[in-house]
Amino acid sequence: MSIGILGGGLAGLTVAAHVDGPREVLEKDSRGGGHCQTMQEEGFTYDVGGPHIIFSRDQKMVDYMVGLLDGNVEQRRRETRSSSRDATSSILLKRADGSGSAGPL
């Protein structure tokens, strides 16, 4: 019996990597990656689904997920801005325990 995995995003591909035996990833788009995709057009490179954070409190899991991307990772300090009426504030993403940055971006 083959196992069907719905979606070829990061979660679906991770499940497929850990399932023993026959499995099939069912993805509606022409390529996998889910929201983690990049396209190039007219000399410019775009993150199709917007910037994505790979984050876990478990460093082994972060290393595993980054390893699946086979070097296709770029780390950036993320600074998100929030606007409310006339005020704009800067929000830096931090780990839940308050130490360091959120990880690879």
Image (cartoon, rainbow, N blue to C red):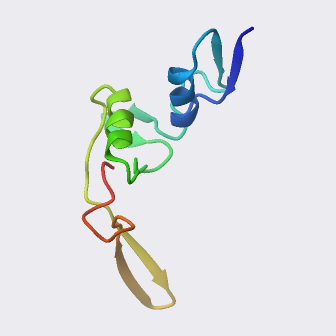
Q: Residue at x 64, y 14 (%)?
A: 23
Q: Horizontal placement of 6 versus 20: left or right?
A: right
How far across and down, in percent of the image, does residue 86 sit? 45, 91
Residue 14 in the image: above or below residue 46: above
Q: Residue at x 35, y 67 (%)?
A: 93
How far across and down, in percent of the image, does residue 104 sit? 30, 48
Residue 19 in the image: above or below residue 2: below
Q: Residue extending furthest bottom?
A: 86
- Count every numbered label the image shows and give the total: 0
Quadrant assignment, res 82: bottom left
Name the residue nearer the viewer: 70 or 64: 64
Q: Residue at x 64, y 30 (%)?
A: 7
Residue 21 in the image: above or below residue 32: above
Q: Residue extending furthest right?
A: 1
Name the residue nearer the viewer: 100 or 37: 100
- Classify the position of the N terminus by image quarter: top right
Quadrant assignment, res 40: top left
Name the residue nearer the viewer: 48 or 8: 8
Name the residue nearer the viewer: 91 or 58: 58
Q: Residue at x 27, y 29 (%)?
A: 71
How far across and down, in percent of the image, does residue 51 sit? 41, 50
How far across and down, in percent of the image, does residue 78 sit? 31, 61
Q: Horizontal placement of 5 versus 102: left or right?
A: right
